[in-house]
Image (spheres, rainbow, N blue to C red):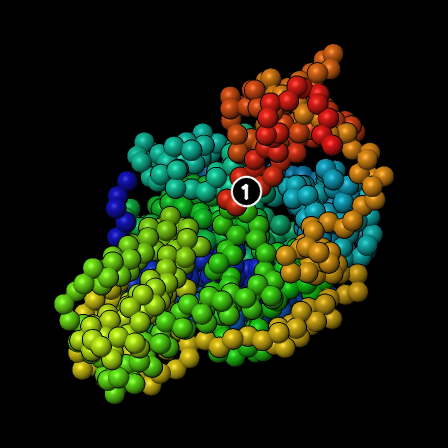
Amino acid sequence: MKTPTRHTVTAALPYANGPLHIGHIAGAYLPADIYVRNLRQRGKEVLFICGSDEHGAAITMRAMKEGTTPRAIVDKYHVLMGQAFQDFGIHFDIYDRTSSDLHRETSQGFFLKLLENGAFNVQEEQQYFDEVAEQFLADRYIMGTCPSCGNPDAYGDQCEKCGSALSPKELKDPRSTLSGAKPVLRPTRHWYLRMDEAQQWVDSWINTGVLDGQPHHDPKEWKASVLGQCNSWLKDGLRPRAMTRDLEWGVPVPLPGAAGKVLYVWLDAPIGYISATKHWAALRQAQGQPTDWEKWWKADDTRLIHFIGKDNIVFHAIIFPILLKMHGGYVLPQNVPANEFLNLEGRKISTSRNWAVWLHEYIERWPHRQDELRYCLATIIPEQKDSEFTWKDFQEKNNSELVSIIGNFVQRVMVLCHKFYEGKAPAPGTATPDDLTLWSAVHGNAEEVVRAIDAFRLRDALSAAMNVARAGNKYLSDNEPWKLVKTDPDRTRAILGNSLNVAAALSTVLEPFLPFTSERLRRMLRIDAAPWADALRSDRIGPGHVLGAAEHLFKPITDEEIQPEIERLHANAPSEAPPAAAPGATDGSPDGRSKPNISFDDFAKLDLRVGTITAAERVPKSDKLLKLTIDLGEAAPRTVVSGIAMHYAPEQLPGQQVVLVANLEPRKMRGVESQGMVLMAEDASGKLVFMQPKDVVTPGGEVR
């Protein structure tokens, strides 16, 4: 495994069929921006790529809904999203688009090379056809009843209620989204990627990090959720997948006799990263800066990283790597740090219901307050599990953290320097144990920022950066220079000199998260941005350095400012949209409980018993389920299927006492009848823990 000399970082191409909301930002784009900014601070060579995904059924469906053309839709939203990214401080080296001529040429060339290399099989198949609209139906043009959960509005490729991956023929009672008519099956021809032939090397590459006999990456660095989803596909066996569609909007299949066929969007879209790199290189060439685009995709010492949401894992961690390797000559991703989903006020974000906070509207209503939202979202990046944004939490984090920790520290230091030293930096003097403790905390937390960012633990990285400000506040409070100036002016100068340099260090460690604030802070201190190591010196601001005027970096957010946002959210959503949760709750219950009240009679129906697990084994073809044998003191033990395999190995469980809902209607899961439900709790880290009795209880004991 070569040490990388450059980093190619991609952020998922957003569909150009609507504006960006905070779920998009927290899931992929803010994490990628934080990561890239810190790499650049440390002198790494980085290319940061994104662009609008402008093909696929979602675009044409939006166009039909608005009575316009796909081109008009993508032109509108490409500009809107690009400007929103820029205004929010997410700065790509290039924000490209997949409807460009260069992208079409790149995608078609890629397809032809794959064809030449034998990557495809041509198959004739039966596909749904809408006789009213007179066209074949792509997956998203078909809706029906999900065979897994019974959702009547599942799409032909996925049920958005239960998350099951589907094919159109699996749907019950299918209907066309174009006309509402029941579609019929007709023969058509498509090019299928021979993914089954990649099964062995993909499995090895994903799980051992070995590619073509050489170490490629460390699988332990990949998130468990990414490995789990990949292995779920691998265990089921990779199967050929169609890489073409019968559509008018998209990249045309560049072959004779393929009229009316386009490249499947998940072949076309990730190649957008490559065509964007070509475009970036061409722009630099035009500016007199010759650039080799290929080194960013083909050099062995390039580290390729994909930032995405969890719904895109298999496309970036399995399908795109297969495409790259079957084409030949390209590096494969060394990590795919996918995040979970962000919820809003106790509910899933829903663009169709307008249950969302749109980024461009936030920027319009809260001008010059980008970092306040960046900070709040960075504290709740859904790294390991779904997280939640509420306007009250946004307000609280601004007031109790940004204002009270960062703003308070910088304001006190600047005001005292202007008051005591006419706005000039004093001499730090001889270091004392308090000073050494301060700088030990600064450097220790700065090192933790780097470690955490490299491990994609961005929430931990932000916490460490905030600890630098906390250390500065503690240092000021412990030494009280506003009092000490009367009795020990030399020591006061040292305290404030050190504090100014901590503020300078803050302008660096906070920059990946709060770039606008860091720039303002540097203007106040009248210093330039500096490389990571140089920026953490204790003598960066020397004696006599002239400071700028003291400013408030942040201002408190009032209830009067927040309440309209909550009301706007409810007013904009359709009347059937569920209500937002009250602070601390998830369903609006007045006293903070997560679910509404039930009657005592309903509660009395539950039969809660203590049981002892006597055996445990994995359920075949499932990453999440364990089959538990539980002794309830009955004539025969119970079999219970529990979704705890991601938290406990089977050998850990025999002898474990649990609380069981013993009168739950039996239910088959993966062919195993489950005769009850084990009650679990979730700790602060997201791990499931048993609701076990404090003392050992005879199996069958009733919980009252």
Identify whether 154 is placed above or below 90: above
Q: Is residue 478 visible?
A: yes
Q: Residue furthest left?
A: 430
Answer with left or right where residue 303 lies relative to residue 132: left
Query: Which of the image's four quarters has the C terminus?
Result: top right
Query: Which of the image's four quarters has the N terminus?
Result: top left
Please state the horizontal and vertical placement of residue 366, each as a whole percent of the image.
55, 77
The quadrant in which residue 126 appears is top right
Answer with left or right where residue 664 lies relative to residue 656: right
Answer with left or right where residue 435 lies relative to residue 677: left
Q: Check disc 1 and report the residue beneath it.
A: 683
Name the residue rendered at 70%, 16% in the picture.
Answer: 633
Answer with left or right where residue 568 lies relative to residue 278: right
Identify whether 352 is placed above or below 263: below
Identify whether 680 is placed above or below 24: above
Q: Residue furthest front?
A: 487
Crowd class of label 1 (few under 14; some 14 to 19; many from 20; radius 10 Å): few
Q: Nearer the viewer, residue 389 or 151?
A: 389
